[in-house]
Image (cartoon, coloured by chain):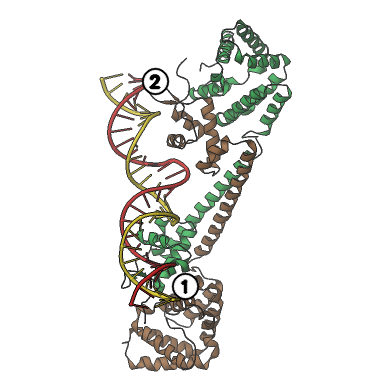
Chain colours: A green, B brown, C yellow, D red
Amino acid sequence: MTTRGVTIGQAAAFAGVTIKTVRHYHQHGLLDEPHRDSSGYRRYGSADLLRLIQVRTLAAAGVPLAEIGSLLDADTERFAAALTDVEQRLTDRIADLIARRDTLRQLADGDRLLLPDRALAVLDRLTELGFDPEYVASKREALVLARALAPEFLDLFLTQLEHRLDDPEFVDLTKRAWDARSWDPHDPRIDELASALADNLLAHHEHLAVPAGLRSQSDDVIRYGLINHHREDQAPTWTRLNALVEAELRSAGVPIPYQ
Amino acid sequence: MTTRGVTIGQAAAFAGVTIKTVRHYHQHGLLDEPHRDSSGYRRYGSADLLRLIQVRTLAAAGVPLAEIGSLLDADTERFAAALTDVEQRLTDRIADLIARRDTLRQLADGDRLLLPDRALAVLDRLTELGFDPEYVASKREALVLARALAPEFLDLFLTQLEHRLDDPEFVDLTKRAWDARSWDPHDPRIDELASALADNLLAHHEHLAVPAGLRSQSDDVIRYGLINHHREDQAPTWTRLNALVEAELRSAGVPIPYQ
DNA sequence: GTTGACCCTGACCTCGGGTCAGGCCTCACA
DNA sequence: TGTGAGGCCTGACCCGAGGTCAGGGTCAAC
């Protein structure tokens, strides 16, 4: 009769795990150390193997190692209860992953990043109306920001945008404002443009409908600033233009938050 | 005009992540460090926030952080390709988790651990035949081992067991062998029992059908030993009894592997 | 002027193992 | 009877995606 029991490599192969994994289970107390042969090698008997298979089965089912020990040593009732608990957690994770995959599907639709169809239609309309692709890109970013920061107002923003695009005068003014990026911040045309923009906005009530909901709390003011002044920091002239417009609106009684 | 940009806490809250997560993204180059205010605090502008939202969206979809940087900086085509790849991986993980959950469901069916219905029927039959519950438990363990170590032979093992249980003489001898655990290993009754067992096995060809498939390769011999000698190490008398039976079978020409 | 909320960096912890280093043991073949 | 390949031993460090703790600075309000 030779030495009793199989070596760690054989045990691991039988159980379908690696040697390192078996030693890991020993270190964490999931498996008792088996006896050692004369050269110090671990030797696994059938009872050891049985336990290893049970541990591996639970681990493969996603049970955290820290729970497996008490689980296997518990009585049948608690064992069953714990298993349904683990199963519930697995179900949750599956639902979570499926939700992630759905998000990803939306992302994967070309460059139509993160935006609902209605927003994409507005962006397409901008292109049709002859806006600079860079301007369209900046609007797209602003809409992505709006969706993330104030999703409950996205539809209102879009309604406002749609109204504004229906007004040829506003379209024209906006194009000129966009071109103004490269002007000197103190170019007198900026003041003219600001006045024209403010007049247009004040003349069309529906062009100004949105901010009302976003003014109440401090966080909302921050969100408003981030969305409405996106990319402004890249063009000082634009900063000044917007400030002038906002000042005129304020003096006309429109409540525009300070950034 | 106060300091431009929001603090890290606000940015994190807007994006739905923790402050630590944002700093983690900085450390790993996914997000450029924003400018700092006079007291060294990070201040995030709308472009920083936009990037953070994009990173968080991809991370939430399960894209490894190490890939997100190049993904967001890549052109649209590679971006789309990478996204479908990520989606495939997600789908695989979902399928994997569902498989785990199914395994778990099987485990959760009471104490009927890891065994198919046919095996459970055999175990129930053992109880009906009046075997000691401990004996039934050891047989259950042996079947679990057999299923894990030699699944392709489990049905053959079960067939053999069923045949043996149909033979009242064999049932009787097995019960006596089980009782023999507590005897002295050199009790003369052990020799008698071994002879009777060997005679019974030799007289009924179908009681010996199984081992044939398991003898060829060295691994199979080990598996055979582990399954057939399970729990033997806990009762030296049993070890001797089995050795005697195997010796008689060998001298009768039955090829039993040495352990 | 103090309290509490927020921010800074840096170091260590998690989980389920993988990988490497350095050395001992066993087996098969010549 | 050597010798080379491969298996085993321990211990230490590594991964991802952050969490937690320690020790301190800053800011706004009361």
Helix, strand or loop status at disc 1: helix
The mark total stands at 2
Residue drawn where x is 43% and y is 63% of the image? A55
Q: Is residue A70 visible?
A: no
Chain letter of disc 2?
B
Q: Position of residue B135 (x, y in %)?
A: 42, 79
From the image, tell me which residue sits under label 2: B38
Residue drawn where x is 56% and y is 52% of the image? B93
Residue drawn where x is 61% and y is 46% of the image? B85
From the image, tell me which residue sits under label 1: B145
Chain letter of disc 1?
B
Pointer 2 or 1: first along the chain: 2
- Specify few, some or many for label 1: CA neighbours under 10 Å numbering under 14, 14-19, or 20 or more: many
Q: Give the answer, above or below, for where A80 lies relative to A93.
A: below
Quadrant of the rendered image containing residue B190: bottom left
Helix, strand or loop status at disc 2: loop
Q: Are marks 2 and 1 on the same chain?
A: yes
Quadrant of the rendered image containing residue B136: bottom left
Q: Nearer the viewer, residue B229 or A58?
A: B229
Q: Position of residue A44 (x, y in %)?
A: 38, 71
Q: Give the answer, above or below, for where B194 lies relative to A169.
A: below
